[in-house]
Image (cartoon, rainbow, N blue to C red):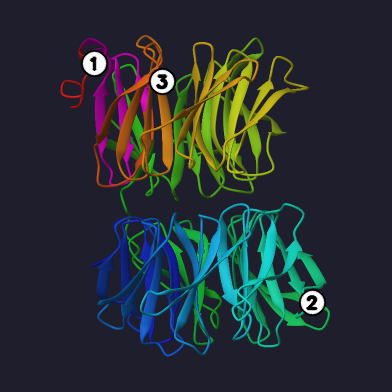
Amino acid sequence: MYHTSPISGIATNNVYVATAGYDNKVILWDAETHLPLSVSYHDHLANQVTFSPDGCFVASSSSDYSLRIWRVPDLQLYAVMRHDDDVEGISFHPTQSSIATASRDRNVRVFDLHGKLLVKFSGHTADVISVEWKDEDILVSCGDDGTIRYWSLSQQKQIAMIDMAGVETDTLSLTKEGLLVSGDDEGRITIFDGQGRQVSQVEAHQSGVKRLIVKNNTVISLSYDRYFRIWNLGRDGLSLVHQDKILPQVWPRSCDIVGDRYLVFVTFGDRYATYDLDKRGWVENEIKDTHGINAVYAYGDDIIFTGDAGNVVRNGKVINQLPSLCNFIIQVNGVVLQGGQNGAVYNGETGEIVYQHHSPLNCQAVLKHPEGTFALVGAYTGEVILLRVDDNGYVSWVKNIQAHKNAIKGMATHGAMLFTACADHTVATQDLTNLAQPALCYVGEHDMIVNGCVALDNGFASISRDKTLRLWSLKGEQQIIASPHQNSIKCISYAPGNNLIISGDYRGTIAIYDLTQQRWVMMKKVSTAGISCIVFDATNGRFIASSYLGELHFIHADALSRTGGMHAIYA
């Protein structure tokens, strides 16, 4: 009954704890014993959970485009509310039988508890991440468009907006006195009065604030800098009371407070973590690993991969265990480099930290340059980290390049050209011929988050939540190709000898585009979980696709080129 993939959302009503996981599960736990009591399922990733004010229901949001309401404590399904994209933030009305949702379809909705849509608020220009009730009539929402918006249920329209100067704002909470506390992607906590006027601001964290909890005059902030901080909210704003470093297994995107003593946090493991505020320390809890694969690298006849547990696996054998989830892995001049959520770049075989960043790390590329061989690492905070790897495998930091203002999701190199894909919908190309002064060549854009990219013979290709494949020339000309994917595309790779592009999505489907024929020639669902990474194994002429279930799938490029069909290429 435990989670088998990372836990994304958590909430408590002091009697129970509810969790939402990337294994599609919603689990109800006993808050005192920490034991699971019941479990139910979404059809795709479960993102967030919350309890109704009377404790009779739990609501969960999901990437299956639904909000689901479950009875407590048996988690029997009570109602389903459909959306047009992933559902993120959810908030029960304080006194009425209704619930508000925030969705990546850019809308805020209010439903009654039987699933009837009462009102849909439109106005956000990007994904909406959080929503909370200010009072019985007014809702407040925030998200990726850098605005905070106020909506009136009775008037059924937007009544006010706060412009955060384009800075993504993922989380907000409200005090009983009507103060609005918001956390943004630059690590700031900003407080607004009941009329939406800013009254104070603090540089709270070195990276994005992902979660805020307000209880009485206490504010708890959780950040990708891997600290949580406890603040006192007074007349002069926030004053720091306590801080502590987050455990390596903790995913700093959701937490809640049980009573006045315990904080509960989501993790990359099979159960949640607990912090004792009285003892100022973590409660012992045997959090077991989950086994999703996030990154694969093939060289010669070897395949190495890593994932949620931080394991380093070569040809099916674990060769090392790192402290936290890893998002990338690569071998450069004989050295395995990997990293992820805790911001460290590791020597994967020895466990040595060769560089420490202040935010999570997402992706990597290799640059062959007259000045040497470099590993390039893309960060959540928009930097490209340049690491020199000499012929003896010694790794040294050179510089950071601020390529974007938001998370870099993918990178690829073509000679001295670096192509980057960003969560703010943009792609960019830098000329790294002069490493001392990188030159921006062009900036392009998708309609939604860009999740990955790959170098082609004469340019680059990128994929996105907008479900398009885009081809870019070295000069920046763009070709938009609609894909057959029904869900957000996660990853992409390229087989140069066959002139084939492969893409994988969050619902386990792969698709292949033939650049010579200029058409999609294959689509196949290969996993019940999302496809996390695809690489081309040049030695064996095949694509290797990994899944969040911990599977590897092999797709042979030569067979596709010969047959033009699907039946002979998948093994």
Q: Is residue 78 above or below residue 63?
A: below
Circle 3 crowding by C-alpha within 10 Å: few under 14, some 14–19, many from 20: many
Amino acid of disc 3: Tyr
For marks 3 and 1, the one nearer the N-term is 3
Kind of element beneath mark 1? loop
In the rendered image, which quarter is residue 83 located in? bottom left
Which residue bears the numbered disc 3? 494
Question: Which numbered disc, 2 or 1, marks the residue closer to the eye?
Answer: 1
Q: Position of residue 499 (x, y in %)?
A: 39, 13
Q: Please name the residue that numbered disc 1 is placed on.
A: 564
Q: Callout 2: few (<14), some (14-19), or many (20+) C-alpha neighbours within 10 Å?
A: some
Q: Is residue 253 left or right of residue 494?
A: right
Q: Label 2 to label 1, Cα distance in Å?
A: 65 Å
For mark 3, give the secondary structure.
strand
Q: Judge whether residue 31 is colored magenta.
A: no
Query: Which amino acid, mark 1?
Result: Gly
